[in-house]
Image (cartoon, rainbow, N blue to C red):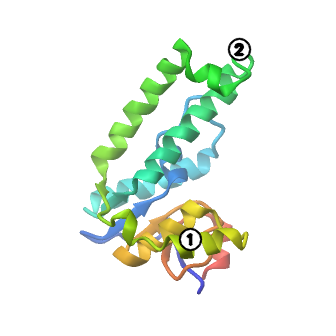
């Protein structure tokens, strides 16, 4: 079943509405200094997130999203600033330079946690077999399949810029023109 995409530029949040925020949105809101993210998208998601908070809607966080955020933040910094000094990522992870980058990432992660409510679905209630089936068919990332399952089970909307979120039968909030076109 196709997802239904809503354009964040005209979307009105309601009080107590719950929205699971995807990793890519957090990277727009709290980017790594050397990140090469599209500033247009960053501005659009910053405006949308501000409207979400002003409306007293509730951003929801899944721990795997926070893990993806931290891992991507660190990789962006390594690729942009440290890869020539530490050609092997593992060498970077054990360096003093890593501690500086990780400290910044930790600060942003704590800000993310301060905005969000963690969802309350235990891992044993997620449909891991369905996520594996979608993954093995080649159409979806395993974590993305789990996020769709979480959104379904908790009746959450998903705020994302990831064009892969076309199927699953959930409501998606986005500024991604391809996703808006694919999921009218």
Residue 114 image point, x, y percent: 28, 44
Q: For residue 82, what is the image quadrant? A: top right
Question: Measuring 40% from the left and 56% from the top, which residue is drawn there?
Answer: 62
Question: Measuring 59% from the left and 63% from the top, which residue is drawn there?
Answer: 142
Looking at the rendered image, the quarter that the N terminus falls into is bottom right
Indicate which label's residue lies in the foreground, 1 or 2. Answer: 1
Label 1 secondary element: helix
- Mark sitting on residue 27: none
73 is higher (above) or lower (below) than 174: above
The residue lying toward the viewer, choosing from 57 and 146, is 146
Question: Measuring 41% from the left and 63% from the top, which residue is drawn there?
Answer: 20
The furthest residue to the bottom:
1
Q: Residues within 10 Å of mark 1 (few under 14, many from 20)?
A: many
Q: Residues within 10 Å of mark 2 (few under 14, many from 20)?
A: few
Looking at the rendered image, the quarter that the C terminus falls into is bottom right
Q: Is residue 179 left or right of residue 172?
A: right
Q: For residue 153, what is the image quadrant? A: bottom left
Label 2 secondary element: loop
Among the two numbered marks 1 and 2 on one chain, the one whose residue lies closer to the N terminus = 2
**Mark 2 lies on residue:** 85
- Mark sitting on residue 131: 1
Q: For residue 75, what is the image quadrant? A: top right
Q: Is residue 71 left or right of residue 164?
A: left
Residue 126 image point, x, y percent: 43, 70
Residue 164 image point, x, y percent: 65, 67
């Amino acid at each position: 079943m196709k997802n239904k995409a809503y354009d964040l530029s005209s979307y009105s949040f309601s009080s107590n509405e719950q929205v699971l925020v995807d990793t890519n949105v957090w990277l727009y809101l709290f980017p790594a200094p050397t990140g090469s993210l599209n500033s247009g998208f960053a501005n659009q998601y910053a405006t949308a997130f501000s409207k979400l908070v002003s409306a007293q809607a509730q951003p929801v966080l899944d721990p795997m999203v926070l893990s993806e955020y931290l891992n991507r933040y660190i990789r962006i910094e390594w690729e942009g600033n440290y890869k020539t000094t530490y050609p092997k990522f593992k060498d970077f992870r054990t360096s003093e330079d890593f501690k500086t980058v990780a400290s910044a990432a930790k600060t942003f992660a704590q800000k993310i946690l301060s905005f969000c409510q963690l969802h309350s679905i235990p891992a044993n209630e997620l449909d891991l077999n369905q996520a594996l089936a979608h993954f093995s068919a080649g159409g979806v990332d395993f974590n993305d399949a789990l996020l769709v399952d979480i959104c379904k089970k908790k009746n959450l909307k998903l705020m994302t810029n990831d064009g892969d979120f076309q199927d699953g039968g959930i409501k998606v909030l986005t500024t991604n023109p391809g996703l808006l076109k694919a999921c009218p």
